[in-house]
Amino acid sequence: MTQEFNVIDCHIHLNRSEQEGWNARAIEDRWDRGGSLPQLERYMREASVSAGWIINAWPTEAMRQALKSRAPKSLDEEAEEVLEGRIREVMRGRCGRKNAWLCDVAGKAPEKYAAFLGGVDPYFGTDWIVDQLVQGAAAGARGVKIISTWGQYYPSDPALQAAFEKIEELGLVILAHAGGMDSHASEVHARDYALPVQWRPVLERHPNLKIVMAHLGFLQPLSGYGSETHQQRIELARDFPNVSYDISCGYEEGFDETLIGMIREIGADRVVWASDWHAHRAVLSLQGLKRSLLTEDEKRAILSENAHRILPF
C-alpha cells in the first residue's frame, strides 16, 4: 500500500474559464481540459493535494503576434508604432486582470492557494511591472511566474533589474520556466532564453531571491541526466543555495531511476513536486513519485516539506 503523504503542488496553470485554458495552451494530452477552478478543485480532491501555487503564465509574444496578425499588412512606420502601442495596452489590461483574479481566488482560500503573478516581461515596461508587483503583493500574491520563452527575452535583460529588486524587497518567490523552448509563437528568434545558465547574472546580482526553476524532468533525453542543461542545473544548485527545482513535466509514464539520479545529483532537499497542471497527467506523475524507489524521507521532502520551507502556507 502506498503511504499517505501531504502534497503541495508547486506549478498549477489556473484559468478563469475552460475557453481561456484552451486559448492559452492547445495541448492534446490534457487531463483536465481547460484548467478552470472547479476542475482544479476536483483534481486536488481526487489526488489529495492540500495546497498549490496558482500561476499566471502570460504568453506575451504569441498573443502579440496573434493580435498583430489581425491588422492591415501595409502600415507605414507611424501607424505600425501606434498599433504596437495599442496592442501593448490591451495586453497590459488582460494580464493585469488575470493577476487580480488569481489574487482574489487565493485571498478566499489562503490556506490552500498561493497566487503567482504574470507579466514580468520587458515588453510591458519597467513602471508597469513594478506597479503590478506592488499591487499584487498588497492583494496577497506570494510569487511571480517568469516564462522567458513565451516572451522571448533573457532573464538578465537590464529592463528587468528594477523588477528583481522589487521582487527581492517584497519577498516574492520566483517560479521560472527553465530548460526547453516552448513559445507557442509562430516566429521564434532564439532557443536559449530559459536555459538555467541564463539566470546566473540575476542570481549574482540578487542573492536574496528565492527561485524555483521548473521542469527538472522536461524532455528528459534532451535536457535531463547527463545533458549540458542538467549540468547547468547542478552548477546553479552548487553555487546558489536560494535555487530549487520543480520536477514537473516529463515523467507521466514512469518515474524511473534516471529521474531519481537527477534528483539526487541536485539534492532531494532542493526539489519540490509540481504537476504543471492542467497541461500534463498530474495524477499519474504523482503516483509515480509515491511508488518510486526514493526513500520515504526524500518523498516527504519533495512532496511538501521543501515547498513549505520556501513558501509557508
Image (cartoon, helix red, strand yellow):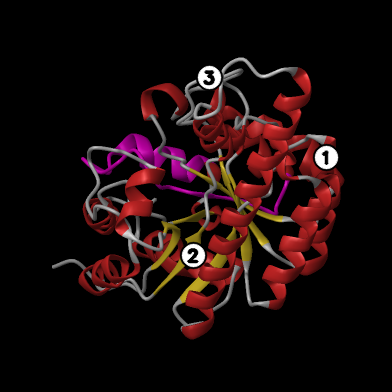
Q: Nearer the viewer, residue 94 or 54?
A: 94
Would you say 268 lies left or right of 97 here? left
- Please name which of the two marks, 3 or 1, marks the residue nearer to the observer: 3
Spatial separation of the CA atoms under disc 2 and disc 3: 30 Å
Residue 271 pos. (x, y %): 50, 53
Would you say 79 lies left or right of 313 here? right
Magenta span of residues:
240-265
Labels 1 & 2 near each other (Cβ < 8 A):
no
Query: What residue is pinned by disc 1?
Result: 159
Query: What residue is pinned by disc 2?
Result: 53
Question: What crowding class fits label 1: few (fewer than 14 Cα within 10 Å), some (14-19), or many (20 or more)?
Answer: some
> Considering only order in the chain, which callout, 1 or 3, is on the residue closer to the N terminus?
1
Q: Quadrant of residue 97?
A: bottom right
Residue 159 pos. (x, y %): 83, 40
Q: Is residue 207 visible?
A: no
Would you say 294 lies left or right of 126 here? left
Q: Amino acid at mark 2?
A: Trp
Outermost residue, left direction? 1
Query: What residue is pinned by disc 3?
Result: 187
Q: Would residue 258 be counted in the magenta stretch?
A: yes
Residue 51 pos. (x, y %): 42, 73
